[in-house]
Amino acid sequence: MEAVHHETSLLLAIILLPMVGSVLVGLFARHSSERTVSILSVGAVGVSFVLALIAFIRLYGLAVGDTSPVLVQQVYEWFELTVPGKGPVPINVRFAMDTLSGVMALVVTGVGGLIHLYAIGYMHEDRSYARFFSYLNLFTASMLILILASNLPLMFVGWEGVGLCSYLLIGFWYENRDYAAAGRKAFVANRIGDFGVLIAMFLIVGVAGSFEFSDINHLAAESAHFTATAAGAGFGAAFPAHPFGLSATFATVACLFLFLGCTGKSAQIPLFVWLPDAMAGPTPVSALIHAATMVTAGVYLCCRLSPLFLLSDVAMAVIAVVATVTALLAASIALVQKEMKKILAYSTVSQLGFMFAGVGVGFFSAGFFHVVTHAFFKACLFLGAGSVMHAVGAHGDADLTKVGGLRKYMPITRWTFLFACLSISGVPLTAGFFSKDELLLGAATMALHGGKTGSPAGWFTYVGLVLAATMTAFYMFRLYFLAFTGDYQSAKGAHDGGSGAGHDDHGYDPHPHESPGSMTFPLIVLGIGSLIVGYLGLPEIVPFVHTHFPIPNWWNEWLGRSVAHLPGHGAHGEVTDFLPSDMANAGGLLAMLVGIGLAWVMYRNKPLKEPEAPGGFYRLLRDKWRVDELYDATVIGPTKALSLFGGRADQTFVDGILARFTQAAVGLTGWVSSRAQTGSMPLYGMVMTVGVLGLLTWFVTPHARLTIEPSGGQTARLVAAAGPGYEYRWDFDNDGRPDTGWSRAPEQTHTYAPSAYEGYELLAIYPAMPVRGERRFKVGDTWTELPFDARFPGWRTRAGALPPTARQTARGIELRPNGADLRFAGPVEDGAATLPPRRIVTLGGVNLIALPKVRSTVEVRNAFGSVSNDTVEVTLPGPIQRRAALDPAEVQR
Amino acid sequence: MNPHLLTGLLVLPLFGMILLLCLPRTWERALKIVGVGTMLLEFALSLQLLAGDYSTAAYQFVERYPWIITSTVRIHYHLGVDGISLWLVLLTTFISPIALYASWSTITTRIKEYAFAFLLLELAMLGVFFSLDLFLFYVFWELMLVPMYLIIGVWGHQDRVYAALKFFLYTTVGGLLMLIAILVLVGSYAKASGGPYTFELAKLTTLVLPASTQYWLFAAFALAFAIKVPMVPFHTWLPDAHVQAPTGGSVVLASVLLKLGIYGFLRFAMPLFPIASQFFGPTLAMLGVVGILYGACVAWVQRDLKKLVAYSSVAHMGFILLGMFAMEPHAVEGAILQMLNHGVSTGALFILVGVIYQRRHTRLFDDLGGLMKPMPIYCLVFVVVTMSSIGLPGTNGFVGEFMILSGAWLSRGPVGLGHWWLPMTLFATAGVIFAAIYMLHCVLRMFWGPVTHEENAKLPDLHLSEKIVLAPLIVLIFWIGFFPMTFLKPMQPSVANFLDTFDARYRQALLMNVDEPQILAALPSEPTDPASALAYADDAAPATHLTATRRAIAPTREAPKVTETGPEADAIEEQAR
């Protein structure tokens, strides 16, 4: 698809409206009436929705032919990075709306707006009414930034922004410490995911040199195309990846790190544990943030970067399997819970697993289709649960053992709730049916056609999803029957009225009532939406009939403009293989029938009876597989213990060594020296005598100290340390026979004869290496390998052979080049050549010089006649003779 | 452009101090006004620095006058500001009045001396940032110690004397070792040049020392700076000093004093000893990463609010160390930006701690809790600052951390983190998780939950004066968060120049591989012709010996005689003599 960019100025306004609303409500309308607050915040989101709709309609008009229209708005340059080899990479505040983000923006502002409206009634008379709406508006703004950002860092602003709002809203009723702790848990779990997103960003910018989604996707698509072409040309897997593109390995690592971020934000294994706790927040929050929008951000991100994900089969398989396991695990927990919101929470985790399974099998648009249908039915379910809680006066969550038969009291809530249940269970012709059908189709396609002979991960996904769908239908209708059929359980007890809201040991309000209009209106819209929104994406073929629908799948066609898809799953593909479609439909219908049937038999018109002594597996399910306990024992506990240890060690050990040890050492020194101050005159006298004697001894002993400074050539200046009345005698060649008589001159200049050489030092000069320099080597009497510094790698590369070995002989330094090209001055005898003193030879591009070492001694005599001596060794530097001009041929001869 | 702006900035606090001395100690209100007023004037004056030309890496507002000039010693009063120091100077002048003003709620005794000490401290800190002469730098560096020692020791809390002494000893030990290193360095330069002892930074950076000498001198400098930063394991003075210091002292300590260590690395230690700093750099960065995780873990289990904030400083400074030694342009820019960020957000945190301490006379979490109910605005501000501290996008912390971490990730050149870039970046990035853990733990224990103590139920919310103090900090948090280019643009040329020069000097020093100190007049832009290294041998010059090899590698050698920077400088010196 060719992306066509169109400038717009609408996008910033869409985002700014709720943001300004949030600031106004939060800072300046704190003490205003509920009416003012409602108008400001609901109005902001409402106008934002209208603007988003206008932008969407413009986008719709632009989507002609085979193009992918994008509305973009560059606001300003945020900051910039410098990537080595790629130059400066600007990070822009730049917004973009394409067919994918357009849909999501409509969902966020539309469903979000309805939930805002609902909250007017739900939060009525709450002490922090304005604060709530301020947070809610801030959330909407952050979510819009997440969706409309055109690059990763800006998306990350929204990504963490929604996390912050989630944190603030879960802990909204801050006086309950558990709620606040749940908020913290959510934030930290999200942060672990954010770690993955950050690393993925660094990975991507290092290789792609850009943060812009369009650039990354373009590069990924090109790389895929290149690989496919190469494979088609017969090179197969052995052919290297696109030289400037993204390799499959890179894509695997980057996608897995991104997916780690998604597991945090979208509550997948292993980071899903925060979402059920997050239901501590007010119900509209659960509906908006923890069901309809924020938690689907992970799916959105995967769709956004779909070409990148498609590069890595491994990452896709991992996503499919993890998502399926999450769907199964969460659905199994939901089977036995007895609170309404808890069931819905696990249901959300499970449904998110469905969506990611769609991503994992490469059906991105199907995954995202489920995001949208889920937004409708899950928001409707949560708001319905909220309506129930509002009606019976429950606070926090509604206990299913205390409700029942509510259809008599609240018909609107009951019908809309039923619609949503039908939809989520996948009853034919509802929204959930169509989206789940697409997901199962994806899994079946992967099972049959993934890889060469079908894919085990595909089979696992397909079977897992069918099982999870069965459980879904079962627990949803269990919930529906327990809440709305049978008799109202709190009516007969009538313990002490509704004032005991929030206390589990009391019954609920004996006279439940339908909720006010501002709450039921959103319910009606969402309930109808749960039934009809699926018609946006009619399947390609009519189930079991194997003929095409007369109208094409609008959804896949629309999303296909911005989201990549597996080859063979195109928007305009002619379907020839009907088996996956039949598998999907059969599986979906079977799951729905079995699930609803079982729930009908077990729970219709019956109150919930908890088993007296629950069996092992039942209890394990009710305890949510004890994942929290597992994390406590394996991760959180040890970390905390380590921190406590660190906190103590910091005071005792680190501080102890540095401060207290030093302090003790100083104290000890002081104590020892103070012990010496005994006041005893004999002791003082003795110490003084010893001191004076010591000084005298030092004074009468001569101290010979010789330094030799080569002054060029074979000449050197010898200097001996001066002293009182010193006389010097010199032995230049160190043969034990003094060369001069005693004299008072402490300085001598001597020219050494070759006979005085004591040995040789090897000097290597690197003339042509990237980094030039020189090294000196001490060479012994036995053959030793010359230890060239790794910093100067020239030796090996130049010679193409092993480093040479060397040893010292009387004539100079003998070299045995280990197969290096011999370009030597001098004859080679027995495979070794002698390096004469002060002569440059070249070996493997390195110039070698053997420098003579000499040793001299000075004797010193002082006025008392005592004598001492000092011997010093020095290397004579020059002069160096002209290089011998021998060609290799001559050497070999 | 005012040619004497920097001197003006140093003199203004002096005037304030003299004025304070002239006022009687009973005129408390007047003393307070003079103290804060001088600092506000100072801030207004320092804004003129922005008029400089920061599109180049050259020092702006340079002032250079002979100070101690004898036949053997050349010490100059040499000041200048570039993109690296610009924001640190502005941070100093910005934070100082805030810190002093925030102190007035708790400081009731010896007001005159307190204001005096603060002005002296500001003067010394600015002096360190301005100095381009090592002697002058050292004087200001040690001068800084005195007022801070007094502020902790006189106006601190219960264990103030212990904390002050510890602070003093730690920093003095580092400072003295640095002094020795400075003297060795200056001596080597004089020996190599055959000229007088000069302390000028610009000249000393042309000295190429043998690697082994560099290691020792760098170690001495690095110890002084690492203690100041503070880097693990030299950090234990910090919690004590912070907990015992009065609010104003903590604010200045966290906001500015800690930055001086990093600034010392950037301005002095790294340019002077390139081989050594590349040799030790990855290790120091690793200690930075250790600091991030260790500081976070230890902060998590603190029971005292102020200690938690102090340990969070250790973690934040770890990020800055990592960014600095990553030696990537945006990592170093990020490190400098993060210094501002830390100054702003940790300064704000200490002010917030001071607010609650003044009301409740306790900082233990066990005595707090549920403060959201009585103090909603305080809570809001606290949460905003917390989010800045844990680097939430949209606040200042994110931009700095992101630049540092991405820079560390990309740091794979010849200079930088070396082979350890991957684990270092991974662990440092994991630090953002820990930051969330300990800061949210702090928020949870202070604000959420029911009010557990009777005394807390009726605590008054932020007063107007406290709001005035905090408002500019909050504005800066979002300003840097949303528009960081305002701050990054002026520092980019200086940072680029710093890195280019470092890289060139590092390569040159490696290449020369000297045994004796040598002076380079200028860096060759291209490596010299390979053949020239042995040219002398082929010419068979009779008196040539081997040291000529090194000369040939560096053909543009400075003449042995010391040349000053220009004719007018010489003229000034002539007059001085």
Image (cartoon, rainbow, N blue to C red):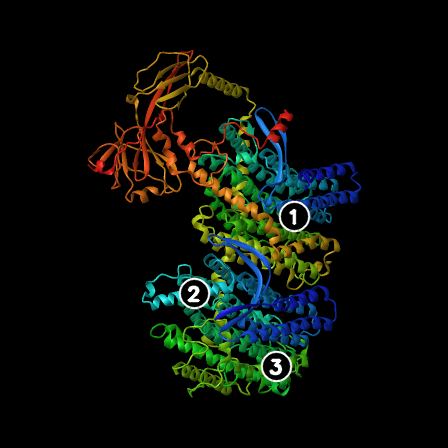
Q: Callout 1: 10 Å neighbours few (<14), some, many (20+)? A: many
- Confirm or deny contact between disc 2 and disc 3 (CB under 8 A): no
* Same-chain status of marks 2 and 3: yes
For residue A56, say whether it is visible: yes
- Of discs 2 and 3, which sits in the foreground? 2
The part of the image, by quadrant, that contains residue A405 is bottom right
The part of the image, by quadrant, that contains residue B435 is bottom right
Q: Is residue A663 left or right of residue A470?
A: right
Residue identifier under label 3: A525
Q: Callout 3: 10 Å neighbours few (<14), some, many (20+)? A: some
For residue A472, say whether it is visible: no
The part of the image, by quadrant, that contains residue A525 is bottom right
Give the distance between the C-alpha atoms of the residues marked 1 and 3, in whole angstroms. 55 Å
Subunit under mark 1 = B
- Of discs 1 and 2, which sits in the foreground? 2
Residue at point 39%, 72% (across, down): A457
For the C terminus of chain B, which image quadrant?
Answer: top right
SS at mark 3 in the image: helix
Residue identifier under label 2: A222
Query: Looking at the picture, which amino acid does disc 1 mark?
Result: Val
Residue A280 on image: x %, y %: 60, 70
Task: Give whichever of A529, A147 is nearer the camera.
Answer: A147
Task: Give whichever of A659, A522 is nearer the camera.
Answer: A522
For the N terminus of chain B, which image quadrant?
Answer: top right
- Give whichever of discs 2 and 3 has the lower sequence position: 2
Label tally: 3
Residue identifier under label 1: B251
Q: Is residue A203 above or below residue A788?
A: below
SS at mark 1 in the image: helix
Query: Looking at the picture, which amino acid does disc 3 mark?
Result: Val
